[in-house]
Image (cartoon, rainbow, N blue to C red):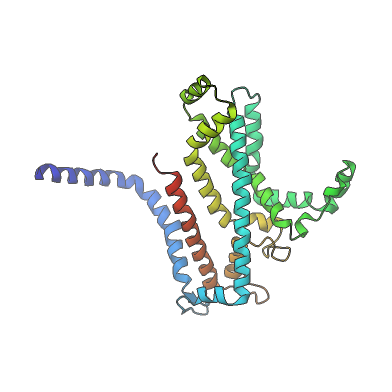
Amino acid sequence: MAVKFWKGRIAGKWKMVIWLPYLAPALIFYVVFMAWPLLTSLWLSLYTGQAGTGRSFVGLGNFTRLFTIDQFAARYWGAFAHTLVFFFIHLFVQNGLGILFAALLTGKNLKGREFYQTMIFIPVTLAVLVTGYLWKLLLNPVWSGPFLEKLHLGFLAQPWLGNPATALLCVSLVSCWQWMGIPVMLFVAALRNISDDYFEAAAIDGATPSQVFWRIKLPLIKPVAGMVAILTFVNNFNAFDVVFAMENVNGAPNYATDIMGTLFYRIGIAGQHPVGIPDPGMGAAIATITFLVLCAGVIPTLRSTQGRD
């Protein structure tokens, strides 16, 4: 028995040595571009000052300043709340419509399937700065007002991006429109992977299309839906470009569209107005808290949606 045990250990180590050269490029890429920057950010959050002028260790001082000084606390909680709203709009609008469109695209009697799939996915291939600027023009009453008047839709010519009550909603919906193709693609693949045996059994039992969707399709694509929700959560907490393109880095108007990405950029990279001096330590503290928030949201979702039935 002992001989078999050691032979098994040696064989396992030999297989690892064989596979190591194939895993090394991906491992090196992960360490250099993901693990090392993460550890560096955690280390930087414990210091204050610039690299050229010298840094000093402050421990948890940056985190204390972030939540106790009104200048930082008001902006942080405002950006955090806006990011949550940004995420939930994507979760229900983008992913909800993604499931609906995927169910329609996988219908057996749908004609022009390839055309609809292409039209839904085309916005994903466009640059965010380009689409953001174009939508900024479309939502500007000065540019779109005359056209809407000709269509007798003049009531839509409103300063949507200039109104704090509607600015974040408009930016979120534009982002949903652009990235809709990705969840649709994933849901279509998941629905097509369901065995026809389920649908044949449902047809024999006399199930309606809505019952098939809610009782068969939706439960079977739960792992994919969970993964899409996780990707949406992570991407929304790292979003920056759509707000930058449609508003500015200050989250105009009056910080109504300020999210975690723009807050981090202002404080850690560009410098917060009116001082204008970057604070890398405070920016790293914001990034560290964002990382912890992502872990708190991702891990339970993974456990609840990716577990074995």
* Nearest the eye: 12 or 189: 189
Residue pushed farthest top?
204
Q: Nearer the viewer, residue 140 or 67?
A: 67
Q: Is residue 52 left or right of residue 10?
A: right
In x, y percent, where is residue 268?
57, 69
Quadrant of the rendering where the C terminus is positioned: top left
| Image quadrant assignment for residue 125 | top right
Q: Nearer the viewer, residue 36 or 135?
A: 135
**Residue 279 image point, x, y percent:** 56, 73
Is residue 146 shown to the viewer in this render? yes
Q: Residue furthest front?
A: 205
- Find residue 293 and report its horizontal and vertical position in percent: 50, 60
The number of numbered discs placed on residues in the rendered structure image is 0
Q: Nearer the viewer, residue 119 or 25?
A: 119
Question: In the image, what residue occupies the spot 45% across and 67% down?
Answer: 42
Residue 59's quadrant in the figure?
A: bottom left
Identify whether 155 is placed above or below 273. Answer: above
Residue in the picture at 78% in, 51% down: 139
User: In the picture shown, does residue 202 fall above or below 241?
Assistant: above
- Visible residue check, residue 238: no
Relative placement, left or right, of 182 versus 201 is right
Residue at (49, 65) in percent of width and height? 288
Is 65 situated left or right of 75 in this image? Answer: left
State which quarter of the image contains the N terminus.
Answer: top left
Q: Is residue 136 above or below residue 118?
A: below
Q: Residue at x 77, y 59 (%)?
A: 163
